[in-house]
Amino acid sequence: MNIITKVSDFENFIASIKSKNQSIGFVPTMGALHYGHLSLIKKSKTDCDITIASIFVNPKQFNNQTDFEKYPIQIDHDVNLLENVACDVLFLPNKDEIYSSDFIMPSFNLGKMNEVMEGKFRPGHFEGVITVVYRLFELVKPNKAYFGLKDFQQLAVIKKMTEYFHLPIEIVPCTTIREKDGLALSSRNLRLDKMQRIEALFIYQSLILCKELVPKNSPLSLKKLIEDLYIQSSLKLEYIEFINPIDLTILEESWVQGAVACIVAYCGEVRLIDNMCVFECV
Ligand code: AMP
């Protein structure tokens, strides 16, 4: 695997790929890689000539300084995993080059999408996500970019940004990869102790329960029911919302096709996010 850290080297590399008319698949990550990330790499490898992964822990998208400081970093382990799935290139830029003085993020308003869930609870988060993804897209110039459905709202926001700027990039959604017991793989799971790892499973179980209870409840009554369950659990629920998968509006009275239950809960200090389609899923 070719590991490139300097932006100028990376730009030369991309120019040579483009001159050969090879297609580029791109998987942006913040590292501490797991099989969820690798599933995106594998998908890109089946679709594209060259697969590029990036690792960059983006300070702009953390609204909580402690969360940023405690974000796990394990480059050697990541390089090993990437080599095992035969990723072609790892782009490992530093902060000063990503946010160089000549980079200007054009203005873009996320609108209502930024007023719910992650947008509401993590002010500035999506502005940070959009900025880094825009900058990475500008450098990588991928034909396709792969994002996990685990971060459902992030995926929707990136799709909207790509469409708004008419970027010639296909955004490919990828299934959430879970542990055998159902816990969604996440870099943050590394911060859970043994007990918390067991407790964290409640998030997946509550999503399954939502799916079972949808036929007998409105979104609002089910939200209340789940909130009550979390009060009795060891997790601290930040939010549960049932949303329309197209525009992320919050459902209250009735269900729509493909409705998604989105949950964020704290297990100790660790903030975990997950979601599941709960109604007429395709
Ligand atoms: P991150 O390193 O957390 O920024 O994630 C990088 C990409 O991997 C994002 O598109 C995530 O949605 C995706 N991802 C993270 N966890 C999973 C998972 N368990 N299954 C599938 N994709 C995931």
Image (tube, helix red, strand yellow):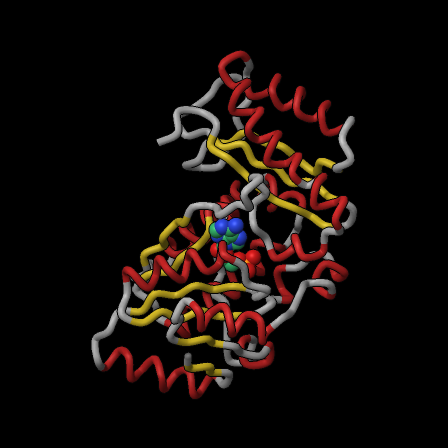
Instruction: Report the label total.
Output: 0
Residue 63 locus on image (x, y percent)? 69, 56
> Quadrant location of the C terminus?
top left
83 or 167, which lies in front?
83
- Eyeballing the image, is 259 above or below 132? above
Quarter of the figure with residue 61: bottom right
Residue 54 locus on image (x, y percent)? 48, 70
Using residue 203 as the reference point, say whether residue 12 is left or right of it.
left
Q: Is residue 177 visible?
A: yes
> Quadrant location of the N terminus?
bottom left
The residue sitting at the top extreme is 216
83 or 28, which lies in front?
83
187 or 80, which lies in front?
80
Residue at x-position 71% and y-position 24%: 229
Residue at x-position 36% and y-position 69%: 51
- Eyeballing the image, is 137 above or below 263? below
115 or 88, which lies in front?
88
- Eyeballing the image, is 86 above or below 127? below
Residue 21 locus on image (x, y percent)? 21, 75
Q: Can residue 109 be seen in this view?
A: no
Residue at x-position 29% and y-position 84%: 16
Residue at x-position 63% and y-position 36%: 203
Using residue 102 as the reference point, say whether residue 51 is left or right of it.
left
Using residue 113 as the reference point, say whether residue 164 is left or right of it.
left
